[in-house]
Amino acid sequence: MDVVILSRVSSISQDNLRQILNLKQIASDKGWNVRRVFEEKVSGTISTTDRKEFSVMLEYVERNQIKLILISEISRIGRKVVDILKTVDMFHKLGIGLYVQQFNMISFENGKENPMVMLLLQVLSIGAEMENSHRKIRQKQGIEIARLQNKYQGRRSGARANKEKQLMKYSDVVDLLKKSDLSIRRIAGITKRSVNTVLKVKKLLAA
């Protein structure tokens, strides 16, 4: 059976590799043929309808009559209950199932929904949204405590946006730094960048 993999992380500084390798191994074990891998680096709070790579994937699976999408866990679809359930319902109406590594089951097979998977999807999607809300609360509380202790100065305006922009600009360097043990000079030679540029990108990744 032909399948595709959907992997999502929340920011460009994170790596999709672990999710992809795990899902490729599962596909190999089950005799599934991975036709294509779709990698997203975007917040799960953004609706699937507003995510470019997700839209590309949806068009691809419809055009190529792919009937199964592999994900590592339900939060890779998103972090909002309504968005997750609407997306899964859309897949099922198109005759497409989800294999969720999190509980090693398929949501839709032979024209039928798996009721156990649907129950788990609802419970875990609620958990994903609650986790995201609690994370934001903890972050806000941490900032308030730091302010009271005069330890929080706030982030310089545009600092995060500039970091993301720089990492996107040097994505070739980012990939080699993350996925290889090559020296700084070797990476500079492969990417035709200066050694200083590679060092700058490495520093950005560590920040």
Image (tube, rainbow, N blue to C red):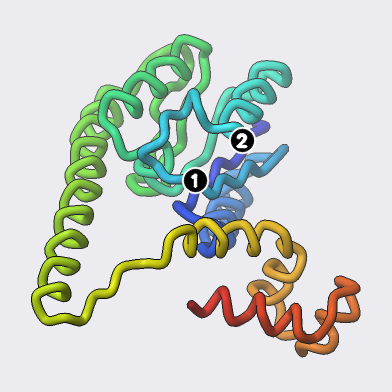
Q: Could you tell me which residue is drawn at 34 percent across and 29 percent down?
A: 84
SS label for mark 2: helix
Total numbered labels placed on residues in the image: 2
Residue 4 percent location from the top left of the image: 62, 37
Q: Residue at x 39, y 42 (%)?
A: 44
Which element is circle 1 on? loop
Q: What residue type is labelled 2?
A: Glu
What residue does disc 2 label?
53
Residue drawn 53% across the image and 32% down it: 51
Q: Is residue 90 left or right of residue 5?
A: left
Residues at badges 1 and 2 in contact (C-beta under 8 Å)?
yes
Say if residue 15 shows up in the picture.
Answer: no
Between 26 and 19, the residue placed more toward the observer is: 19
Q: Is residue 27 visible?
A: yes
Q: Which residue occupies the foreground of this view, 198 or 51?
A: 198
Cα separation between marks 1 and 2: 10 Å
Closer to the chain start, of discs 1 and 2, is 1
Position of the N terminus, as image quadrant, is top right
Instruction: Please name the residue that numbered disc 1 is placed on.
Output: 42
Q: Judge from the rendering whether residue 176 lies leftward or rightward of residue 11; answer left or right.
A: right
